[in-house]
Image: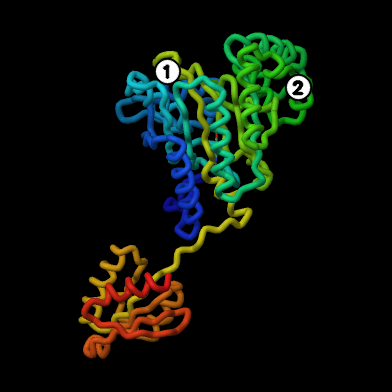
Amino acid sequence: MNNMQIIRGFRDILPENIKLWQKVEKEAKELFEDFGFDEIRLPVLEKTEVFARSIGEATDIVEKEMYTFPDRKGDKLTLRPEATASMVRAYVQHKMYASDPVRKFYTIGPMFRRERPQKGRYRQFYQIDAEIFGVESAYVDANLIFLLNELFSRLGLSDLKAHINSLGCPDCRPDFQKALLNLLESKKEELCPDCIRRKESNPLRTLDCKVPQCKEALKEAPTTLDFLCKECHGHFETVKRVLKQQNVEFIEDKTLVRGLDYYTRTAFEIQTTSLGAQSAVAGGGRYDLLVKEMGGPDIPAIGFAIGFDRLVEVMEALEKSADKQLLDLFIIALGDAATEKGYYWSTDLNLKGIRCEIDYRGKSLKALMKRADKLGAKYVLIAGEKEIKENALILRNMNTREQISISADNPVADIVGAFKKNN
Ligand code: AMP
């Protein structure tokens, strides 16, 4: 194996693919800011405890997917597998609730999970994450799902559907769990080894087991919706009513349990049909108990994470291209004197927002004209020794082939003027 190759499951996002990433990031930031979210930036490394306690010891993420290692002093550290736990850690650590418990944050960055890599599933992947602290009302649940829907529609994606469910609360969950455990006990001969284990450690997870035999055995399993208490039922009804009112299409999905321990009440996922097995583009839910569990006061919260890589892949599948940024101007400077001047002009033009390049390799006019073509330059400025001497540079419009002559004294102003007139 070549040691200079990238690690399995990690990848480079190359410049030729970056435009969609930038487009998504720009749309997301604009939308979140309009909806009152503030950006927060969090470290990628945390104490292992931050994730183990919150996500849950008996989840796939904590059991087998985290990149955990001792640092040089022996402290156990983990590369973050998701952002919510760090977000709650920060909210509690900085006592943000003290001045105002109601906070709305978003963050964008890499996450790390040692899953089996395949298309749409990487060991370093990116998430766009938004969380609302301090509000129990179902309006914010609906608002977050609305927000996701709006972002996807601004990005031109229409084959996405919200799946929603309610997981209940500590008042109603025990009855559901009892009923589920009874069923699991009676079907234990038919379950896969993972589900046998989950039966003890995290019974809810058996409900989204992908093994066909388990699916069959648990076809008639009780669902959290059957057991919701009056408050949880009312909460879920409000979420659905508001979404309907706002024309957000959704599917009530009783099998949606999500892989993390901390969820209560509303859980949701945005799924696509265009990515094959990795169909979830975003997921989230309410976690009313987590702030307290992580050492803060009793403050409800809800959030979601969008899988940035998968979102871009859906867009690529639909050929949603972002416009390729072409060059505005290519400066052809021939000879040392012209090159020195050309260097200052190009910097000035860059500062004025004009995407401009100059070539320093001493190539011929013919070679440089070819290069201007290759870079897709809209204009070329020709500054040879003759043009400098005669104080008449040539500005050529590469589309119309029209050429104008401009003075070498202050070509930047003339070029900016030409751009204003023509663009
Ligand atoms: P989760 O934190 O598991 O709810 O994931 C939220 C979203 O992140 C998912 O819906 C996926 O779109 C994305 N995601 C999760 N794991 C991966 C991964 N290993 N590679 C790429 N995207 C992922």
Q: Single out the mark in the foreground, 1 or 2.
A: 1
How far apart, in angstroms, are the residues tagged by discs 1 and 2? 33 Å
Query: How far across and how far down the image is residue 202, in percent?
Result: 61, 18
- The residue under label 1 is which amino acid type? Met
Residue 235 location, quadrant: top right
Q: Position of residue 95 (x, y in %)?
A: 33, 20
Instruction: Work out whether 397 lies above or below 349.
Output: below
Q: Which mark is residue 294?
A: 1
Give x and y (percent) for residue 316: 59, 54
Residue 391 higher or lower than 117, as above or below: below
- Find numbered disc 1 in the image and state the secondary structure of the residue it sits on: loop
Residue depicted at 40% across the width and 30% down the height? 69
Q: Is residue 1 visible?
A: no
Q: Residue at x 46, y 56 (%)?
A: 14
Name the residue located 51 percent from the left edge and 53 percent from the top edge.
20
> Callout 1: few (<14), some (14-19), or many (20+) C-alpha neighbours within 10 Å?
some
**Residue receiving disc 2:** 218
Work out whether 39 lies above or below 301.
below
Find residue 255 and report its horizontal and vertical position in percent. Answer: 69, 26
| Residue for point 59% across, 46% down | 153
The disc, 1 or 2, on the residue closer to the chain's N-terminal end is 2
Q: Is residue 394 left or right of residue 312?
A: left
264 vs 126, nearest the viewer = 264
Under mark 2, the amino acid is Leu
Quadrant field for ligand 1 = top right
**Residue 298 placement, left or right of 275:** left
Tell whether label 2 touches label 1 (CB within 8 Å). Answer: no
